[in-house]
Image (cartoon, rainbow, N blue to C red):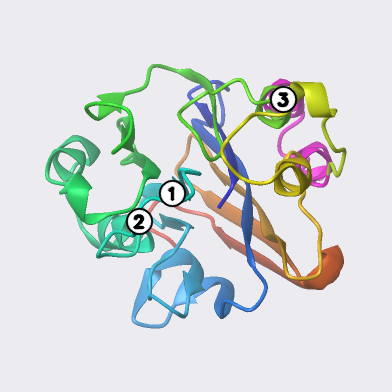
Amino acid sequence: MCLIVVGWRAHPDYPLVVAANRDEFHARPTADAARWPDAPRVIGGRDLEAGGTWLGITEMGRFAAVTNVREPGMAKGEISRGALTREFLLSSEAASDYAKNIEPNRYSGFNLLLADGDSLFYCSNRDGEPRPLPPGIYGLSNHLLDSPWPKLVKARQRFGEALQHLPAESAFFGLLADQAIVADESLPQTGVPIEWERLLSAVFVKSENYGTRASTLVWQRADGAIHLHEQSFGREGRPLQSSVISTSLKHGT
């Protein structure tokens, strides 16, 4: 996943709100967002190649999402980063304990967000020790937390505006659909060719072989209700399946 914006206790009625785009090669096999057949309290998509997930939430409000760190040329880790989110969602450990027990050297560069209902933790094997985040709005792309990449700065601003209109969803999906390419002088320099820097500078990435595969809005209401709405996409941004999954009570329905 290449862009995540999180509102953590930034709205009085919605303690957790997440808007995210997952960017990936279109050839990588994926299951759209759903309850997991082997763990039906977990809601999210699944990577069918390595078995993990980029983003998920449980009926009890445990949330996890991961992005990679863009660092071309680095050796690959022995375990898929999607296992970090999968194992947290399947566990009952507090976010602080789970974060503390991660073996960071076994993974390629990652950014990980973990919420257990009481706290939101940020973990990265490129940015020091795991740390709890105070209430606020945070953004992740493929560098470190709140790196001032133009698309992330813009997405955080629009997310803050959209937050005021919950439960309306259109403003969140509007920000996730932004295909504007950043001017060359404002592009980050991450070691990939300039053509890739341009392509990846958009919030919504669109091309034949690589792009935004899913746009997802997730929230937990103060009464514990969970809502996930995901729109998946094919090559060149072609809309595919839309999935909406909600629970009305903290313990699920």
Report x, y in % for residue 224. 45, 44
Callout 2 amino acid:
Thr
Q: In the rendered structure, find residue 150 and report the number of the disc placed on it.
A: 3
Q: In the rendered structure, find residue 85 and report the number of the disc placed on it.
A: 2
Sequence order check, earlier mark of 2 and 1: 1
Callout 1 amino acid:
Val
Callout 3 amino acid:
Pro
Q: CA distance from mark 2 to mark 1?
A: 7 Å
Q: Which of the 4 image quarters holds residue 29? A: bottom right
Image position of 150 with respect to 142: above or below: above
Number of numbered markers: 3
Sequence order check, earlier mark of 2 and 3: 2
Report x, y in % for residue 97. 14, 40
Q: Magenta span: helix, strand or loop, mainly?
A: helix
Instruction: Give the foreground label among 3 and 1.
Output: 3
Image position of 143 with respect to 39: above or below: above
Name the residue rendered at 81%, 57% in the picture. 206
Instruction: Give the foreground label among 2 and 3.
Output: 3
- Judge the density around disc 3: few (<14), some (14-19), many (≥20) Cα neighbours within 10 Å: some
| Residue 253 visible in the snapshot | no
Residue closest to the eye, 251 or 82: 82
- Magenta span contains residue 170: yes
Q: What residue span does the magenta drawing correspond to?
A: 156-177
Do the numbered discs 3 and 1 sit on residues whose CB atoms are within 8 Å? no
Q: Which of the 4 image quarters holds residue 198? A: top right
- Judge the density around disc 2: few (<14), some (14-19), many (≥20) Cα neighbours within 10 Å: many
Name the residue rendered at 85%, 66% in the picture. 236
Q: Secondary structure at mark 2?
A: helix
Q: Secondary structure at mark 1?
A: strand
Name the residue rendered at 36%, 22% in the picture. 133
Q: In the rendered structure, find residue 66 and report the number of the disc placed on it.
A: 1
Name the residue rendered at 19%, 48% in the picture. 105
